[in-house]
Image (cartoon, helix red, strand yellow):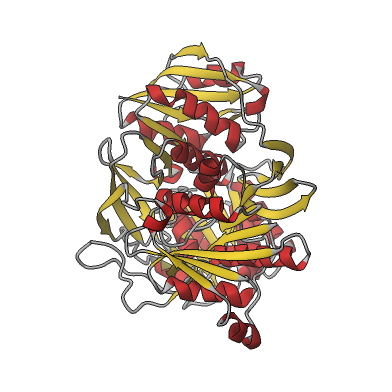
Amino acid sequence: MKILVPVKRVVDYNVKVRVKTDGSGIETAGVKMSMNPFDEIAVEEAVRLKEKGVATEVIAVSLGVAQCAETIRTALAMGADRGILVESDADLQPLAVAKMLKAIADQEQPGLIILGKQAIDDDMSATGQMLAALLGWSQGTFASKLEIAGGQMTVTREVDGGLETVELTLPSIVTTDLRLNEPRYASLPNIMKARKKPIANMKPADLGVDPTPRLTTIKVSEPPKRKAGQKVGSIAELVSKLKTEAKVI
Amino acid sequence: MTSLVLLEFDAAGIKQPSRSAVAAATALGEVHVLVAGTGLDAAAAAAAKLPGVTKVLVADNAALDHLLAEPAAALLIALSPNYSHLLAATTAVGKNIMPRVAALLDVQPISDIAGVEDADTFVRPIYAGNGLATVKSSDTKKVITVRAASFDPIAAEGGNAAIEAIAVGAMPALSKFVSAELSKSERPELTAARVVISGGRGMQNGDNFRLLDPIADKLGAAVGASRAAVDAGFVPNEFQVGQTGKIVAPELYIAVGISGAIQHLAGMKDSKVIVAINKDEEAPIFQVADYGLVADLFTALPELAAELERT
């Protein structure tokens, strides 16, 4: 079974992002970029399934600017076998991404596609579910555990009140929650080895997809800032102020 | 222009995040709501009382019992021709189902809206709430999830909508519910609580979270946690408040032993009053706190419990 793992290049988790002064978006020039953290968990899970003998090949796919090849290299260094880069300078939104991933899935015929549950830039949390819909497959979103046996997959999902376990028919889609695994660090030999692994290059048109965005960003503004309040000296003062000043208890 | 809102409910009635989604929908025009599953009489009656709702659609079918995405999306697709907007709350259920619906309609979903400008234009947080994007959709039909913390829920009573049973067609059999392991708690749900008290890495271990219990009991609070505390295995993931957990906006949020990473702030900075207790006076949480106490939580928490008991 092949596993497809889409990986997104996003502003690094640790960067404090700034809204551009003209309100047109977020400042990304000169900012450190990394693989979306939830996608690292997806790559790790796919590589583990290959190590267990469940998967035969792990293919990392990234869509976006040319530098997304670096994100694919990261996945290859973690243990993915080969990469596919769909190069585009357009603002790729989840619907277009899901359509392109569907076209790739039609070509590659994976038995499982593992994605991050959300990208930490647009916070949409949509692509996995949309891809499942377009392929007509089942979906196990927000997964904290998965087991595969005999054409079926059992997924434990993080839901609002706790955990939910579902049984899904393969092929299927999994989106990762943070407790699914702890991604490995790529070793230096594996980083070197990854340089020799192949990355195929294509364009949205090669996949027959029009990537025109359906959502137009009119403006991006800074959220209202909270001001630091006052320091209190004791618990007694805190409780008294919450009662008489803030009137919340 | 009519909207359809997918409701979540339990024995106590329509869940608060769903009532917030109805609030967002009322800004768009006429509102119908949908309850799905089996044994729906109580839920349908509760839905009919929601002010501003004109019709309750009841989809009675065992395939819809746990609102798995595959059948629930199929149902919404079947109902979609009558509606301009399809909405649900940004919950585990809503997030699972709505993008699937959108893809089947060839629509780009508008996730987690925090504001309605007009029928096509919405405000939604990006980058963990560090930016507020105003986006305009060119799709003819809109598929939306609603950030519950950004819309005051409509009241549970006061309306009198018509109830209509709908026929449910064949449902896809791609998925099967096996089991649910839900944490049993007498406390309010995180996203609905008036007061939330959260612990962070400073709590040091899971046992120490019990120090929050007497305070939560006294204040009727829900207990939450930072991602650091969840990652460290102190508490289960359903406690997580933040960009990748739950978004809360209670009247009072008490952050204990939480440094205040931007990802955590993303989940609680719309709280009305924020209290921070942390021994590190440089902790970023103090920059957003209305009341900050620099103290060791292991002495402050028992003291706080005693003070609340005393006064």
**Residue B273 position by quadrant:** bottom left
Please provide percent x and percent y for residue A203. Answer: 39, 62
Please provide percent x and percent y for residue B180. Answer: 72, 41
In this orientation, does residue B69 appear? Answer: yes
B244 in relation to A184, above or below: above
Front-most of residues A66 and B261: A66
**Residue A185 position by quadrant:** bottom right
Q: Quadrant of the N terminus of chain A?
A: bottom right
User: At 52% across and 39% down in the image, what residue appears?
Assistant: B94
Front-most of residues B253 and A217: A217
Front-most of residues A205 and B74: A205
Q: Number of marks in the image?
A: 0
User: At 40% across and 37% down in the image, what residue appears?
Assistant: B143
User: At 51% across and 55% down in the image, what residue appears?
Assistant: A104
Please provide percent x and percent y for residue B278. Answer: 54, 71
Query: For this view, does A17 lie left or right of residue B69?
Result: left
B180 in relation to A196, above or below: above
Query: For this view, does A243 lie left or right of residue B174?
Result: left
B43 in relation to A80, above or below: above
Please provide percent x and percent y for residue B95. Answer: 51, 44
User: At 72% across and 61% down in the image, what residue appears?
Assistant: A55
A186 in relation to A42, above or below: below
Front-most of residues B164 and A80: A80
In this orientation, does residue B239 appear? Answer: no
